[in-house]
Image (cartoon, rainbow, N blue to C red):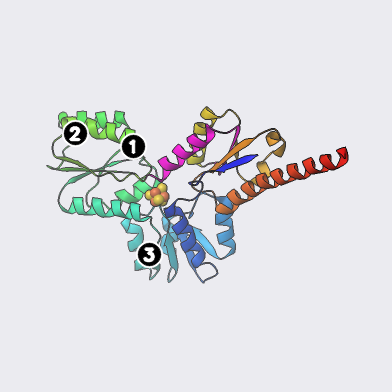
Amino acid sequence: MEILLAKSAGFCFGVQRAVDTAYEHADEENVYTYGQIIHNEEVVGDLTKHGVQVIDSDDELLEIKDSKVIIRSHGAEKRIYDILEAGGNTVIDATCPFVKKIHNIVREEGQKGNTVVIIGDSSHPEVKGIVGWCVEPPVVIGSEEEAEAFVRKYIDGEVKTADNISIVSQTTFNYRKFNYIVDIIRNKLYNVTAYKTICNATSVRQREAQEIASKVDAMIVIGGRNSSNTQKLYEISKKECENTYYIQTLVDLDLTTFESVSRVGITAGASTPNKIIKEVHGRMDEMNFEELLKNDESRVSIK
Ligand code: F3S
């Protein structure tokens, strides 16, 4: 059986950097992460065992003093840094540099007096973090419909904007949708500058999954139950390869399914640790080895 493992499977650069940062401070005194460092129960559980605790609420934020607090790759609002520093804490900033760049853009554009428009999901922590670096409350738009509504309100005089409008996007936003929304705004409003702040890690992973799934007899997609990007990889793969299996860990892998498979593909979501990917890959490799042994034994018995 040939195994095609996606090069882009698993952590992106920003998530890897944040997880590594958390492990660098494991077993030290009073270390926290602001929110779970990653949506993966195993990693969060392991870090907790090594003394890295998670804080989620404002109340907890206000309580901790003289501690180290790691900001995850999504970033956080400016006020979080202010609260932590006021409490004498050390902020260890593992915000992904691509997200940090957006914080800087919205801050600078706001300081110039421009209206900031953020294209993204307003409930997503990354977008909340970006909003928190704006000088004035920004406009957050998540869909073409919301963009149309914003433009209508502008024409009706219900919303006012500055002379210049600066648009940024959530890093994981769909590129095509971003362009549609920018066009809707550009068609009716003047002096619009759109910054391309979409990170291509997600689209690279999805493209590779599609490519591999189109060449194999079976496809394994590894990721957490609630990981929306893994779900998306599963959907993309399933379209290309009917025998696509969504597993969380090696335990979910039913090896009998792969007995007559000659080519298998493996990919994994952005929050799937390398260790799990290696275990699954290793187990498929072992299957190959076992198959070889079986063939060898049958040759011996024929003699
Ligand atoms: Fe990952 Fe940073 Fe891109 S967290 S998805 S590399 S913006």
Q: Which residue is mark 2?
A: 186
Residue found 35% across the figure and 41% down from its top: 122
Q: Give me the disc on residue 139.
A: none
Quick check: is 204 in the magenta stretch?
yes
Q: Amino acid at mark 3?
A: Leu
In this view, which residue lies farthest toward the left?
163
* Image side of residue 253 versus residue 68, left or right: right
Q: Which region is colored magenta?
A: 200-226
Q: Quadrant of the C terminus?
A: top right
- Mark 2 C-beta closer than 8 Å to ligand 1: no
Residue 282: % across, % down: 65, 49
* Image side of residue 175 versus residue 45, left or right: left
Quick check: is 28 in the magenta stretch?
no
Q: Nearer the viewer, residue 104 or 198?
A: 198
Distance between mark 3 and mark 1 Cα atoms:
35 Å
Residue 56 visible in image: no
Q: Amino acid at mark 1?
A: Tyr
Q: Nearer the viewer, mark 3 or mark 1?
A: 1
Q: Nearer the viewer, mark 1 or mark 2?
A: 1
- Mark 1 C-beta closer than 8 Å to ligand 1: no
Asked if the residue under mark 2 is in contact with the one under mark 1, i.e. CB atoms within 8 Å, the reply is no
Q: Which residue is mark 3?
A: 84
Q: Which residue is mark 1?
A: 175
